[in-house]
Image: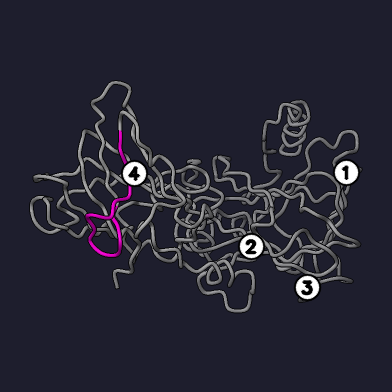
Amino acid sequence: MKKITYIIGLAGIAILSFGCVHLLPIPLDTAVDNDPYYIINKTQNTDYVDKFTATDIFTEDIKSTWGFEKDACKNFTVSTDVKYQGDASLSLEWDKSKKGCDWLGVGFAWNNWQNVDMSNILDSWAVSFWIRTKTGKMPTIPLTFNFIDQTSKATEYVSVSNKFYEGAGIDENWKQVVIPLSYFKFKSKGLNLTEITQLIMQFEGTASIYIDEFKFINTSTAKNNETAKQMANATKFTATDLFTDNIKNTWGFDKDACREFSVVNDIKKQGTSSLLLKWDKTQKGCDVITAGIAWNNWNSVNMSGIIDTWALHFWIRTKQGKMTNIPLSFNFIDDGNNTSENITINNKYYKGADIDESWKEVTIPLSNFHFKENDLNLFEIKQLTMIFEGSAEVYLDDMKLINLK
């Protein structure tokens, strides 16, 4: 019955594939059918379920999988002739251009068909594998991955692009691919993080490759994986200045009927200038007043290692008078335009009851922005956004990210 369901699922995919709809085949097997422990004891082995210990997807042999049958579209086998390390690699040959090959994919239920609790590893672990061509070069790797949970909810589909490996394309030399789990958007896609069941690999175009040492790795503790070390260390957080003496890599810092944002040199906390921010959202047509700082020269920033120990820090004062709360809030945005929590300036983040014409220090811990809770990709934070409400006229200076320790 399961095989019939699987075939029907594939037929549906073939019919709808031209509409660019991503559908997943129903898994051919389950833990009930395949796990000897379950068959004997009529219950799941808690060693599989309670914590994340199942890290190997493929190292030496194919197990707990579906879709590896040889047919006119594909030939997937274990090869002992070519390998990165150990005794074998996974030989993958496919041609999606052939008639009837509208969808090609396989599934890895790598924890012996048991659910996997991945709730504690999403921010610091990655999928890693080594890859090479059988012959020649390939400019791109036509593979896509996603995960599904117990209810078949699917994560984001992540293509293997060169942001996950060094250089352009692959050849007959082994190259490591490292895809941080944060790219899959488990939380925003609504998956049950304690019941992840499978990793799905989908194949595009035509290729003939080897894959080896296919597993999960902890990028924060990687020692022998050069690309993993690059993900964790080589993209170290060094872009700390958002504004010191001039505006750069920004948008929205304009002068119009709603706002007047400019750099001035007559008032400053330190250095040569400060940022004068004057706005009035009550004016007609001023429903939205925002500005952004893409402070790393418009490149994404890896903030995975700092969100628990660093803070957004700046100095602020009014142009005239006192204000208890400044109607200005901040959030961060990642490469997929997911936004963090909005944080408004209030006396939780500075000393005293008011902000007046004396400079006051503001420190907002990054943890308050709830990056993880809002499922941001910590490896690719792209900008800080400022949202202006009400009306005010203030000076801001020396805005940067600081280490609270």
Provide residue 94's location: percent of width, then percent of height: 86, 48
Q: Kindly report the distance in space between the C-alpha atoms of the residues bearing marks 1 and 3.
A: 26 Å
- Residue furthest front in the image: 266
Quadrant occupied by the N terminus: top right
Nearest to the observer: residue 184 or residue 289: 289
Mark 1 touches mark 2? (CB < 8 Å): no
Residue 49's place in the image compared with 89, above or below, is above
Q: Kindly report the distance in space between the C-alpha atoms of the residues bearing marks 3 and 4.
A: 48 Å
Number of marks in the image? 4
Q: Nearer the viewer, mark 1 or mark 3?
A: 3
Disc 1 residue type?
Answer: Cys
Residue 365 visible in image: no
Q: Earlier in the sequence, mark 1 or mark 4?
A: 1
Circle 4 is placed at which residue position?
386
Q: In the drawing, what numbered circle is on residue 84? A: 3
Q: Quadrant of residue 164?
A: bottom right
Circle 2 is placed at which residue position?
178
Disc 4 residue type?
Answer: Met
| Residue for point 26% across, 36% down | 279
Q: Kindly report the distance in space between the C-alpha atoms of the residues bearing marks 4 and 2.
A: 33 Å
Residue 265 on the magenta segment = yes
Q: Secondary structure at mark 1?
A: loop
Q: Nearer the viewer, mark 1 or mark 2?
A: 2
Circle 1 is placed at which residue position?
73
Residue 22 visible in image: yes
Q: Kindly report the distance in space between the C-alpha atoms of the residues bearing marks 1 and 4.
A: 51 Å
